[in-house]
Amino acid sequence: MSVSAERIHSMYTSEKVKQIANGFITGAERCMEIRTKSDGTFESALIAGVVCKAFSIELLFKAALLKERGEPVHGHELKKLYDDLSDESKLRLQRTLSLEQDSLEQKIDAVSKAFVKWRYIFESETTDLDINFLNSLASAAQLLTD
């Protein structure tokens, strides 16, 4: 069975993309929970949580871009997607996060490749990530399509 490009585009709405992103946010939050095991040690699925959170931001940026442009965009790098957002969306993020534009861009650049890097974290000797910013960015990005 084949599906035409027109049919795919008609199914691909900003709201549907946002709903999927919200599911990944929920998954990320569950993964990042710290649980006590029966032996008294702790566990969490932090890596999976970071991957889900980064992917949710990617989807939220794509939902905003779809709403602004009327067509889907591709790619995983958050900074490239952010750069493509309208000035209004960038300003909304800046205000929601209480950051100056330069600071916001630096912070987004620092987490830009988290989705790819953290999926393959075993290939890296070290990595650095501001999880608090990642969480804040996901919350702020949820407001872009409201």
Image (cartoon, rainbow, N blue to C red):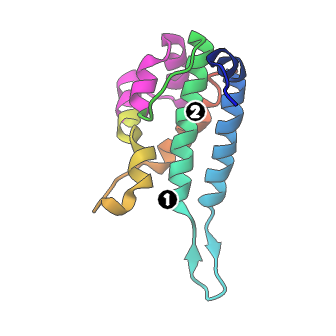
The quadrant in which the C terminus is found is top right
Q: Earlier in the sequence, mark 1 or mark 2?
A: 1
Give left or right: position of 19 versus 118: right
Range drawn in magenta: 78-106
**Visible residue check, residue 100:** no
Give left or right: position of 109 versus 22: left
Q: Residue at x 57, y 82 (%)?
A: 41
Give left or right: position of 82 versus 20: left
Closer to us: 97 or 128: 128
> Which percent across, then down, holds residue 2?
67, 27
Q: Residue at x 54, y 36 (%)?
A: 57
Residue 122 location, quadrant:
bottom left
Distance from Cα at disc 1 to Cα at disc 2 = 18 Å
**Visible residue check, residue 41:** yes
Where disc 2 sits, the SS reads helix
Q: Are marks 1 and 2 in contact (CB under 8 Å)?
A: no
What residue is pinned by disc 2? 59
Look at label 1 and name its amino acid. Answer: Ile
What residue is pinned by disc 1? 47
Look at label 2 and name its amino acid. Answer: Leu
> Which percent across, then down, holds residue 43?
57, 73
Does residue 25 lie above or below 34 as drawn?
above
Closer to us: 21 or 130: 21
* Residue at the far front in the pictured view: 1
Q: Residue at x 36, y 34 (%)?
A: 109
Closer to us: 67 or 36: 67
In terms of secondary structure, what is the magenta stretch mainly? Answer: helix
The quadrant in which the N terminus is found is top right
Residue 40 location, quadrant:
bottom right
* Residue at the far left in the pictured view: 125
